[in-house]
């Protein structure tokens, strides 16, 4: 697809979104005026088949979604979590992995080159010696949950007793969600 075709497709999609109907228009205006009030933070893979707002049938302002290939965490993602938990008062953090994850697959097959290596190295740290893709995905999710629990265990602005940190794996084939804890 040519660049001009892609740009046209994106613009047409935006026009449809702007004309999505009165309910969406009212909600868009309300959240613009009063701010977002997400009830959960979802850390998900950037995979285009994994769209948390659709998976959980959530509307505008309901989820604070952080997406990065392989749903790995660094200071940028942790800062985003901190913001949503401390300032938007989200009380759940969901680390969401998925079947058929390309980043996990790349890590299992030897990593990657360039900037991808930052992601695959982190996944390899999480999965250890595991080479089964599904079990590796689960280990990666659990690693992220453990990391979040450690990082926010004694945060001065986030009441951790009220903060649930959990993990799940989404099946891209049948659409189901399986909680890991």
Image (spheres, rainbow, N blue to C red):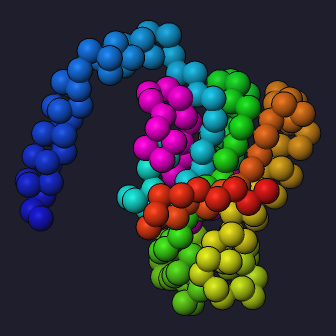
User: Which residue corresponds to the image point at 57% horizontal and 76% vertical from the top-left?
Assistant: 104
Count of numbered circles in the view? 0
Compared with 18, 125 (above or below) is below
In magenta segment, residue 9: no
Q: Position of residue 54 (x, y in %)?
A: 43, 44
Q: Residue at x 65, y 24 (%)?
A: 88
Task: Provide residue 25's location: percent of width, then percent of height.
Answer: 30, 17
Image quarter of the C terminus: bottom right
Query: Compared to 91, does 113 lie above or below?
Result: below
- Left or right of 37, for residue 181: right
- Residue 73 on the magenta segment: yes
- Magenta stretch, residue numbers: 54-76
- Which picture quadrant has residue 118? bottom right
Residue 164 located left or right of residue 106: right
Q: Is residue 132 visible?
A: yes
Q: Is residue 71 visible?
A: no
Q: Is residue 77 above or below residue 39?
A: below
Q: Residue at x 10, y 46 (%)?
A: 8
Residue 128 relative to residue 154: left or right: left
Query: Which quadrant of the rendered structure holds the N terminus?
Result: bottom left
Query: Which one is nearer the viewer's eye here, 172 or 74?
Result: 172
> Measured from the top left, where is residue 22 in percent x and y?
26, 15
**In x, y percent, where is residue 163?**
80, 35
Kindly identify the residue that appears in the image at 32 percent across and 17 percent down.
23
């Amino acid at each position: 697809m040519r660049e001009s075709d892609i740009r046209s497709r994106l613009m047409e999609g935006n026009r449809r979104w702007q004309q999505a109907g009165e309910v969406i228009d009212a909600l868009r205006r309300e959240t613009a005026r009063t701010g977002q009030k997400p009830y959960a933070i979802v850390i998900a893979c950037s995979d285009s088949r994994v769209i948390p707002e659709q998976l959980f049938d959530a509307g505008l302002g309901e989820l604070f979604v952080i997406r990065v290939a392989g749903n790995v965490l660094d200071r940028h993602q942790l800062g985003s979590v901190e913001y949503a938990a401390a300032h938007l008062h989200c009380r759940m953090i969901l680390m969401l992995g998925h079947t058929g994850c390309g980043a996990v697959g790349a890590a299992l097959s030897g990593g990657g080159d360039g900037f991808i290596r930052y992601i695959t190295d982190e996944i390899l740290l999480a999965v250890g010696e595991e080479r089964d893709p599904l079990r590796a995905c689960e280990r990666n999710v659990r690693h992220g949950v453990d990391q979040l629990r450690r990082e926010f265990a004694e945060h001065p602005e986030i009441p951790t007793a009220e903060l649930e940190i959990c993990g799940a794996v989404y099946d891209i084939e049948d659409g189901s969600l399986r909680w890991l804890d």
